[in-house]
Image (spheres, helix red, strand yellow):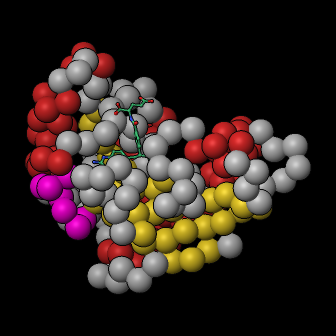
Amino acid sequence: MLCLVESMTGDHPARPVLVLSNDPAAAGLARAAARGVPVAAVDHRPFGRDRAGFEAALLAPLLAARPDILCLAGFMRILTPDFVGRFAGRMLNIHPSLLPKYPGLHTHARALAAGDAEAGCTVHEVTADLDAGPILGQARVPVQPGDTAETLAARVLVQEHRLYPAVLRRFAAGDRTPVWLG
Ligand code: NHR
């Protein structure tokens, strides 16, 4: 499995400057650090409902790293319009549904409950409206008989690991044409 950090080598137009997590125990931090990529963590839990306080803490390592592009991946804290506005047009997210279907949480259970024949994932630009920014790529997978939210999530995750590097490579080269896979 190729993660985003590991995709940014050779002729790739971007290089990773920071991996930042809201979970100090996130496996991606150790994995990035092992490759010599700077890492930081800001645990959101001590901030409780104080989203602005959490985001101010996030901004310290983030601004110091001076990223051109931000990629959310499994980042589960809704960001305020203030924070999003600082990085307008250069923050991406991968979401495990075929947006505009199923923004928000529990996407696989919702796709199964609806009887959908296919599911998938979407890379989109992060705007103030949750999971509603411009679509930059999508990958589709079939729903199979007997699928549970867990088996479907695992099949979608394989595609997430193909889609996100493909979209980031194109986006970092200045091309916002959507990538369609599967
Ligand atoms: N922030 C903004 N402003 N816009 C988006 O499009 C965002 C965002 C923050 C995160 C990722 C998104 C996903 O891919 C994302 C997109 C978390 C929630 C959520 O409800 C919803 C969507 C996404 C991420 N978070 C709860 C909260 O109160 C906490 C849920 C939990 O901890 O399990 O922040 O799915």
Task: Using the rendered view, name the quadrant where residue 1 is placed.
Answer: bottom right
The answer to whether residue 78 is visible is yes
Q: Is residue 80 above or below residue 95?
A: above
Task: Using the rendered view, name the quadrant where residue 47 is placed.
Answer: top left
Write the residue at 63% across / 59% down.
120
Locate residue 116, reporting x and y percent: 73, 56
Locate residue 147, reporting x and y percent: 81, 44
Locate residue 96, reporting x and y percent: 55, 51
Q: Quadrant of ligand 1?
A: top left
Residue 177 painted magenta: no
Write the residue at 51% across / 60% down.
99
Q: Is residue 15 above or below residue 176?
A: above
Q: Is residue 142 above or below residue 175?
A: above
Residue 89 painted magenta: yes
Q: How many marks?
A: 0
Task: Using the rendered view, name the quadrant where residue 48 is placed.
Answer: top left
Q: Is residue 32 left or right of residue 78?
A: right
Locate residue 6, reporting x and y percent: 47, 59
Magenta segment, which residues?
84-90
Residue sitting nearer the eye, 131 or 174: 131
Write the residue at 25% across / 42% down.
79
Write the residue at 40% across / 79% down.
170
Residue sitting nearer the eye, 116 or 151: 116
